[in-house]
Image (cartoon, grey):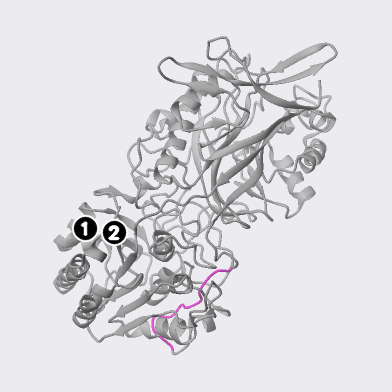
Amino acid sequence: MSGRLTATSQRSGGTWGSGAPRRRRTLADMRLGASILTRLLPGLVAGATALTAAIGAATPAAAADSPAVGPAAATSLTAPSGSTTFRIATFNVLGNSHTTASGDEPDRPSGTKRMAYAVQALAEASPSIIGFQEMESVQYEALKQLTGATYGTYPGPDPDQLVVANNIAWRSDTWRLLSATTFSAPYFYGKFSRRPLVLLQNIHTGQRVYVMNTHNPATLASRGDATAYRNQAVQIEAALITRLRSTHPDIPVLFTGDMNDWSNFYCPITAQAPVHAAYGGSHVLAPADQCNPPTFSATSATGTTTYKPIDWIVGSPDVSFSGATRLKDDAVSTASDHPLYWADATVDTAPAPTGVRHVVAIDLEGLSSAGLAKSGARFLGRLRAGGASTLDARTEPDSTRVLPNALGMLSGRKVLKAGGNGHGVKGSHDDGRTVASHAGGYVASAYDVVHDFGHSTALYSSDPDARMIQRTWARHGARDRVGAANGRNKLSKVRLASSDEATTKAFASAAGHLKAFSLVQLTGAVRAGERSGWSSAAYRKAVKALDHRVKRIVHAIQAHPATAASTVVVITASAGGHGHSTTGSRPANYRVPFIVWGHGVPAGTDLYALNPSLLAPGAGNPGITVGQPVRNAMVGNLATSLLGLPAIRGSIFDSGQDLNVLHTPQAALAPDPANQPSARR
């Protein structure tokens, strides 16, 4: 039977697993990819990529059309409002290997030819987000050739067929990719493979959504009973959804895939994660468990046919679904042995207020993580105990010099212009020019966003190179393009001093009238390191002096009730150091602390534990394509997000504003079996 079928809810007969999984052999020689999970924290399941040890070296690249770090759109200057409606689909396109001469369906056209029918069906359905399954490399290449730049994809092409198989696609005229990673779940024989997780932003409304996609293993005569592996996969997927919801409650989660189960997917996923199905259904857990998975039905002259879906679209509670459709017309039937499913999703945007009115970013220039750990700095230790932090943050991927990193903290950009979205300032010192003259065009900063939305800003610095910051955003700021014209000067207050003592005193004296966003630069550590060496007693003494100055800054904020209850302090370093220099490829140069303390920040938490999409970088400093760690360049967008403002135009680091520093996960994820020794043998 072909045509569109609408979803209805029907009792499953009271047993889970009554929907028999499809019995079909998958590609026998498909190489199962080893999981590339890395440790975010003990017990965290998330995807990662192999990270390199040399500074500036890139990680394995994602598809050229799907960078894992996407620049904030130049037009993104309005906060999300109202509602966003879009169509989302899931489609198992039947792997090419099934329809070769040696496949189990040799009478069908090749995967390349069938992809033309798949594209035809998708053009009719017009989804803007699609989760694919079984898309082998030749089919991926055909998709890109047939659709050109219509869709962005992730993970894109990959040597591992199982990675290619589960690509997520989105219309480039509707969505932009903010960040991407992978999680792992069991496939045949319990071996783990990578599945995509992307953060997309609607370019028309600003709404952000997480999208996950998977293919859970089928029970096949040639592969054995996969029920236990499917159940394990659902547990992992449910735990990841739960964690995303608890750490980013303002970002909806959508999950697509071929689950190879009906009730045995719907009932567990709705019990274990805060989701509901696009097709309807109901699941009441108390006082007695009553699970009613949805079905699709079609009525003809011969009667009514009921279909139990094994391909699913589910979403978090803040997503409402309508128009769920199961299509199995001639085009779909030629393209695949699976139906094409879609539904219209609507998200009503209601940003949760943070209560944060002031953000103070403190750049302790030259403070390496090793230097902080060895210094005995007590107050910084107290801030770590009272807030969220890591000693495993990174500088820019392409520079460990102070000035380029300070500009990256403000702009959210990388340094080098190659490949786009670099601010272009490579030198160590102010050369009398603006950042715009280096970049070849205006470079927006956190100062722009905060000022243009009518709030105040400040710069306090003992670094003479801060004159470039002042020159760029005070004297040569861009025209205000938001609301009332507040002028081109993005800096409400500037105090450049010759010493850390004078800088600290200037901030403390003005703390009663704290600006919405302030950057404080203290230079004692970098000066001591360059003069006496990062392993010297003089350097350790300088770090202790910085510790005392940070204490004075925080106490000045706490001295005023209005700021004590509404301020977040972000502390990091624009560079570490080794020997007598900040530059080099040693971890001491690029490994820096990142501490967030203040209103709403959960005490004693690890930033990687709070952020399942960020990846602890091991010993290296990865490039920008895949698997981002916490970076000092995330300061600017963290500040704007805490203040409830949009991302910085042209930024790439935390341009999705999803660096979580406020919400503690409600549950930990189970240990990843792919990381256990038995799984690696």
Left or right: residue 79 compared with residue 150: left
Magenta-colored span: 420-431
Instruction: Report whether residue 91 is seen.
Output: no
The N terminus, quarter of image: top right
| Kind of residue at disc 2 | Ile
For the residues labelled 2 and 1, say whether their Cβ atoms are less than 8 Å apart: yes
What SS does tag 2 mark? strand
Asked if 179 appears above or below 217 in the picture, the reply is: below
Instruction: Residue 196 in the image: state x and y as whole percent.
Output: 55, 42
The residue carrying pointer 2 sits among few (fewer than 14), some (14 to 19) or many (20 or more) residues within 10 Å by Cα, namely: many
Asked if 68 appears above or below 279 in the picture, the reply is: below
The C terminus, quarter of image: top left
Q: Quadrant of residue 630?
A: bottom left
Left or right: residue 544 compared with residue 169: left
Which residue is pictured at 22% across the width and 67% down the height? 557
Instruction: Report whether residue 497 is seen.
Output: yes
Residue identifier under label 2? 595
Mainly helix, strand or loop, the magenta region? Answer: loop
Residue identifier under label 1? 383
Which residue is pictured at 55% across the width and 78% down the height? 442
